[in-house]
Amino acid sequence: MDGRVVQVNVSPGGVPKLPVAAAHVGRQGLDGDAHHHDFVHGGPHRAVALFAIEAIERVQADGHPGVVPGAVGENLTTSGIELSLLPVGTRLAVGGADGPLLEISAPANPCDVIKGAFRGGKSGRISILLHPTDSRMYARVLREGVVREGDEIAVLPPAPASHATIHHELDLLEAVENDAWLAMWSAALEAGFDVRLLAHGDLAAAASPDLPGTDFNRSFGLRTVPIKRPEVEALFRAAGTTGWHVGGLDDPEFAGDTGEDPVGVHVASVDDVLGRAAAEAPAVPGLTIRSVDPGDADEARRWAALVVAGFGIEGPLALAWPRFNPILVRAKGYHQQIASLDGRDVGAGAFFSRRRVVWLGGATVLPAARGRGIQRALLAERVRVAAEGGARRAMATADVGSTSAANLEGLGLRRIWTRALYRVDVTAA
C-alpha cells in the first residue's frame, strides 16, 4: 500500500496550514512550521501530522466541505494510503533513500483549533474512536530529509527495535499520572502552602518554596513537549527552588545530564493483575484493608501519618501531609486504603483512576510489619477496587531493583520504560 505526497503544509501557528513546494523535515517537524498549542502538538513523538486525501473526501461527502488539504493542520496530505489503519510503528519512506523516514506514532485527536473547518464545529468527525478510517496520524522522524509535493511514499513494517508502541502507551499512562500529581499539588495549595503550578496539555509542573524536595518541585511532560523546558525552569527559578524534570534515561533531551533515582514504569491489564493475585498471592492472616472515607478528616490524617512513618518522611513535608491529605482524599478519582494487621494500622496505599487506567500511587508498610506479603495485598486490593470502577489498565512506578519493583513484577506489571529525575539547580543559572 504505497502512495505519494499530495501537498506539503506549514504555518507559523494555527490553521489552515498552507501549501509549500518543499520543506526540510527535522526531528521536531517541518522547517517553517509551528503550533499555537505547543503544549500538545509538535515535539519528537508528534513531529509530523499526516492526513489522507481519501479520508478528506469521505469527510467532505459527509457534509463538511471546509475540510480540505491543510485545513485541519496536517503537514503532509497523502494519497494511496489509508493512514489511520496502519499500526503504530509502521514506517513511511518519503521520496526515496535520501528523503525523510517517518514512523507512525499515534492518532492525532481533534481539538478546538480545527473545529471551524467542520459544519457545526463537529471536529469529532475525524476522531479515530468514532471514525477509525478518517483520523489524522502523528509520526516520529527517524531520518531527516526534504519532502516535496509529488514524492512517493513507501510503506514499511515496524522496525524490530522500535519504541513507537511504548511511547504511544506512555501518552495515555502519563496523562493519568500527571492528573494524579496535580491533584496532590492542588490539595497542598488549597491547604495554604505556596505551591506554584504550570499545567497545560501534556505538561504538569510544580514548584514550592514551602515544601522542598522532589515531590513538590518537579515536572512531567518533557518527553512529548521538550520545547516547554525553559518555561518549567523559569517556574523553578521564580520560586527559588531546586527542581527536577522527569525524563527517560535515554531521552535525547537530557543527553549529558545525570539522572537520579531511576524508576521503572510498570504496566499490566487489570484482569492479569487480579488473576495473578488470586493464583499466587497468599492470604495474610489477620490482615484487613479498608478504604478511607473521603468525609472523615481524622481517618485521612491517620492515613497520612502512616505514609510519613512508612516512607520515613521528615521536615516540612512530614508536617504538610496531615494538613493537605483531608483535601486530597476528596479529589475526583483519588482513593486511599489503610491496611490493618490484627486490628493495628500498619500500612497505607493510594490509587488514582481516570480514562480506565488506574495509577497505583505510593504504598508503604511500617517496618515492623514488613516481609509478610502486605504490600502485595495492598496492591491487589487497590486494583480490585479500581476494577469495580471500570479500570482496565494498571500502571505503577518503582525504584529499579527494589522490593516494590519485585512485587509489581510478581503480580504481572512488567517494566516497559525506565526514567529518572534530572536536577535543575537554580543557583547555578
Image (cartoon, helix red, strand yellow):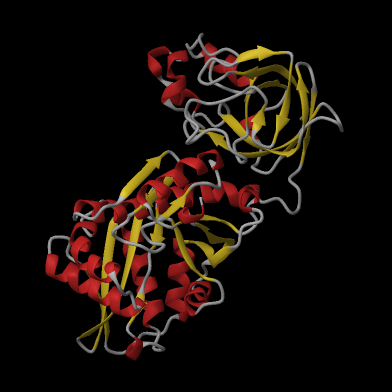
Given residues 286 and 76, the one toward you in this image is 76
User: Residue 264's image quarter?
Assistant: bottom right
Residue at the image point whose x is 68% and y is 37% from the top: 27
What x and y, as percent, mark residue 333? 29, 53
Given residues 130 and 98, the one toward you in this image is 98
Given residues 235 and 175, the one toward you in this image is 235
On screen, residue 362 above or below 156: below
Q: Say if residue 325 shows up in the picture.
A: yes
Question: Horizontally, is 28 left or right of 200 in the view?
Answer: right
Q: Say if residue 244 shows up in the picture.
A: no
Residue at the image point whose x is 32% and y is 56% from the top: 209
On screen, residue 243 above or below 261: above
User: Residue 343's image quarter?
Assistant: bottom left
Residue at the image point whose x is 51% and y is 67% from the top: 413
Question: Considering the image in quadrants, where does the N terminus appear?
Answer: top right
Residue at the image point whose x is 49% and y is 66% from the top: 272
User: Residue 300's image quarter?
Assistant: bottom left
On screen, residue 407 above or below 282: above
Q: Residue furthest right?
A: 97
What x and y, as percent, mark residue 86? 66, 36
What x and y, as percent, mark residue 93? 79, 33
Question: Horizontally, is 202 left or right of 34 in the view?
Answer: left
Q: Residue furthest top?
A: 65
Given residues 295 and 154, the one toward you in this image is 295
What x and y, as percent, mark residue 49? 61, 29
